[in-house]
Structures are given as C-alpha cells and as structure tokens.
Image (spheres, rainbow, N blue to C red):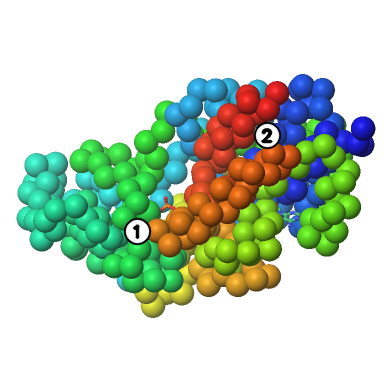
C-alpha cells in the first residue's frame, strides 16, 4: 500500500478539480507545484485592494450547466460581461466584431449595409480558407482584418497570418447586432473574491507542496502514490523523446498608477504592430462595485517560448498536433499516469473546458 492514491503534478484548475473529485470519493492525493503558489494561471494577487489576475485576464464563461453549477457551489460570481475594445493607432473599435465595430469602420448604421460592405470585401476569398488570413478576410473582410486582426495576431503568435491555422480566429464571434458581449456563452462572470477562493476550496483537505518540481526527483515522487495525474508539459514528461512541442509565452508588466480610472475598460487590445504589447488589462474594472484611489494595469507582451519561460499557449498547428499525437499514443500505454490540462493534453482549453475535461476523466476514474 502506498501513502497516497494519487500524486498530482501541478496545482492549476485541472489538478484542483481532480483533487476535489478524488476527495469526494475518499481518495488521498498529494500535490506538487513548482511555482511558489497554487492555482496555476488563474492565480490572483491583491494589490492596492484590487484583485489582480497575475497571469492575464481570466473571464469565466460557459454554456455547460454542470460546470456553471459546479463553480457556483464553491464561490459567488459577479455579473461581469467582457466587452473589450481594440485600439488601432488611437482609433477605438468595439469587440467582438459587431454593428458598433462596423458602424465606426464603414460609417453604416444597418446590418444590411454592413453586410453589403463586408460581402464585397470577402469576395476575394473563394473556396475553403487555407490559413488565418484567408479565414479572417472571409469572415469580416480585408479592412477589419488589416486594422484589427493582422497586427494583434502576428504579435500574439509571432508568425505571419498566412502561416497560422484558420481555427484560431474561429473562436471570435461576428455579429450583425449592436452587442459588445465578447462571448456567446450562456453564463459569464468572475469570482467576487477572486479565483484563489475557488482554487483553495477545490484543494481543501488536500496536501500540497509548492516550490517543488516533479523533475527534480521524479522517481521518488512517483513512488509515493498508486497513480499520477500529470498536468505539466507532456513532452517534458517523456524527456522530449520525439522532439520538443512549441508554445507561446507572455511577459506581464504590472504598474500601480496614481489615478482612479486609467483606460475606462477592463481589456484594451492594441492591434498595431508597432505597439509591442497586445493588450492592457485594468483589473479594477472586473468589479464594477470597486472604488479605489489608485489603479493597477498590466501590459501583456507576447514572447517566443524557450525553456525556463512559462509555456502559456500550446501552438496547435498541424506539425505540433502531429508531434503531440505521438506523445498521446505513448501516454495511452502508461496506465498509471493520467495526463490532464492545457499542458498535459496540449490543448487551448478555456477554464470551463478544462473543468469539463477533468470531470469527464473523473467520471471514468471514480
Ligand atoms: P495551468 O493553470 O497551467 O496549471 C499547470 C500547473 O502545473 C502550473 O501551476 C505549473 O506551474 C505546474 N507545473 C508544470 N510543470 C510542473 C512540474 N514539472 N512540477 C510541478 N508543477 C508543474 N480561460 C478562460 O476561460 N477565460 C479567460 O479569460 C482566459 N484567459 C486566459 C489568459 C491567458 C493569458 C492564459 C494563458 C490563459 C487563459 N485562459 C482563460 C485559460 C486558463 O488559464 C486555463 O484554462 C487554465 O488555467 C488551465 O488550467 P491547467 O490546470 O490546465 O493549467
Ligand atoms: N484577435 C484579433 N484581434 C483582437 C482580438 C483577438 O485578431 O483584438 C484574434 C487573435 O488571432 C487571437 C484570436 O483572435 O489569437 C483569439 O482571441 P481570444 O481573445 O479568443 O484569445 P486570447 O488572445 O485571449 O488568447
């Protein structure tokens, strides 16, 4: 008999949901986390009385009732609706692409007028779009592509839009209504007390150790438990035996400003290539009831990933997906290890999808 039923590597949302379900089923878990805190990328810090999303803005949105009820049982959510704006050389456009965007860009007022302009522009793409540029033009036409998509996307992914897969842009809604809600989902909000409360409740009663890298002593850690749940990088787990997967990284620069309201919105995107960051987050606007004298902003700079940097985004292009498939096949032969989460499954999961996936795995496991 080993000391624990599960060794969980990583303490992000996937790990936390797994630990919570395991606890409900009387299983004992031990969590190791290489950072100096639990929570992975949804971790928050309090600065000047403001909840700061340390690893980028996190807005919870889902259409899955089970997931929404699951998180609401643990913490209260506010009614925040994400309505970001995009700044192109000082011109402000509403996102996602909707009648407010079209009316400012094309001086039109009716959906039929906006459609007529866009249809004319998108006619240049015939047949199935082969890359992100073609997909974007076929969705919203060349003008919006060049002003609001091209620069942002090339900064974010570090590649020409012609060399990026079309699916990245399919996530963005295009609407012929005056509706600035960035998401199409049924439910949306942000935990009133920040995401740490959610994470702490999920891990309640579970032993964990921070500042501990699995790879510093993998055999000893593995020997502690019957099974392992691994939410780190799958390629690293297998010593990069088929080669390294690609990721995109980010650098966050956070500043406290001596003003009560800096940009008037939680998320402002910058789509001009000459601005080095992709967006500025003003954290206090995630909570419309918050009154503070100062404000905290974070600039997000995309970075080429290399070892030692945080691998925030998997690059799910054909080449990397094919490489991941090899690792996945190998992972399927390891019956005592469950690979989970954004890094373990090498998928661009939003929080709701991450919870959904974790619950699906737990349904099978327990
Ligand atoms: P992570 O949160 O990455 O957790 C993995 C953990 O494992 C990390 O803490 C890491 O340090 C640890 N770890 C890795 N390797 C080891 C090791 N060798 N030993 C020990 N520990 C290890 N989702 C939304 O729904 N809405 C949003 O608005 C949104 N915005 C986002 C913005 C950004 C900038 C990013 C990067 C993501 C965003 N997401 C958003 C996605 C969200 O962050 C993920 O769905 C979620 O955090 C995934 O959780 P996870 O457990 O899979 O991974
Ligand atoms: N995007 C864009 N301009 C914007 C916002 C998004 O071109 O102002 C594109 C970009 O390619 C990005 C994709 O849409 O990678 C998905 O954006 P989303 O906000 O869903 O993802 P995030 O950038 O927050 O990870």
Left or right of 341? Residue 347 is: left
Left or right of 112? Residue 351 is: right
Q: Nearer the viewer, mark 2 or mark 1?
A: 1
Left or right of 177? Residue 296 is: right
Left or right of 234? Residue 171 is: left
Whole-percent x, y for residue 32 in the image? 81, 49
Residue on which disc 1 sits: 165
Q: Nearer the viewer, residue 222 or 360?
A: 222
Would you call the spot at circle 1 few (<14 residues within 10 Å), some (14-19), or many (20 or more)?
many
- Which label is found at residue 79? none
Name which residue lies at 63% across and 64% down: 241
Q: Is residue 78 at least partly visible in the picture?
A: no
Name which residue lies at 25% across and 41% down: 175
Whole-percent x, y for residue 54 in the image? 65, 56
Does label 2 point to a residue whose CB lies under 8 Å from ligand 1? Answer: no
Name which residue lies at 73% across and 40% down: 336
Tell me: residue 224, above or below residue 85: above
Tell me: residue 360, above or below residue 169: above
Q: Secondary structure at mark 1?
A: loop
């Amino acid at each position: 008999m080993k000391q624990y039923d599960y060794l969980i590597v990583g303490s992000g949302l996937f790990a936390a949901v797994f630990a919570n379900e395991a606890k409900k089923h009387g299983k004992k878990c031990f969590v190791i986390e290489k950072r100096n805190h639990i929570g992975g990328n949804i971790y928050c810090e309090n600065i000047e009385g403001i909840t700061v999303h340390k690893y980028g803005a996190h807005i919870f949105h889902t259409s899955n009732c089970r997931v929404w009820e699951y998180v609401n049982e643990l913490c209260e959510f506010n009614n925040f609706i994400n309505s970001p704006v995009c700044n192109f050389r000082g011109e402000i456009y509403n996102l996602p692409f909707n009648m407010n965007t079209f009316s400012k860009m094309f001086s039109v007022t009716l959906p039929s007028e906006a459609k007529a302009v866009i249809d004319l522009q998108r006619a240049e793409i015939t047949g199935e779009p082969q890359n992100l540029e073609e997909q974007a033009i076929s969705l919203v036409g060349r003008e919006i592509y060049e002003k609001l998509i091209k620069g942002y996307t090339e900064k974010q992914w570090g590649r020409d839009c012609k060399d990026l897969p079309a699916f990245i842009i399919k996530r963005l809604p295009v609407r012929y209504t005056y509706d600035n809600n960035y998401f199409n989902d049924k439910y949306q909000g942000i935990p009133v007390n920040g995401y740490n409360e959610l994470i702490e409740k999920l891990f309640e009663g579970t032993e964990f150790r921070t500042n501990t890298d699995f790879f510093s002593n993998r055999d000893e850690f593995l020997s502690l438990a019957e099974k392992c749940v691994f939410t780190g990088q799958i390629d690293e787990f297998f010593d990069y035996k088929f080669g390294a997967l690609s990721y995109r990284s980010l650098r966050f620069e956070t500043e406290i400003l001596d003003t009560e309201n800096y940009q008037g919105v939680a998320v402002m995107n910058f789509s001009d290539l000459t601005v080095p960051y992709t967006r500025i987050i003003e954290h206090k606007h995630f909570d419309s009831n918050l009154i503070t004298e100062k404000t905290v902003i974070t600039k997000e700079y995309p970075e080429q990933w290399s070892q030692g940097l945080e691998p925030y985004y998997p690059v799910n292009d054909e080449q990397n997906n094919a490489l991941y498939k090899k690792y996945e096949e190998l992972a399927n032969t390891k019956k005592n290890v469950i690979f989970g989460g954004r890094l373990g499954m090498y998928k661009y999961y939003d929080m709701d999808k991450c919870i959904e996936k974790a619950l699906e795995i737990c349904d099978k496991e327990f």
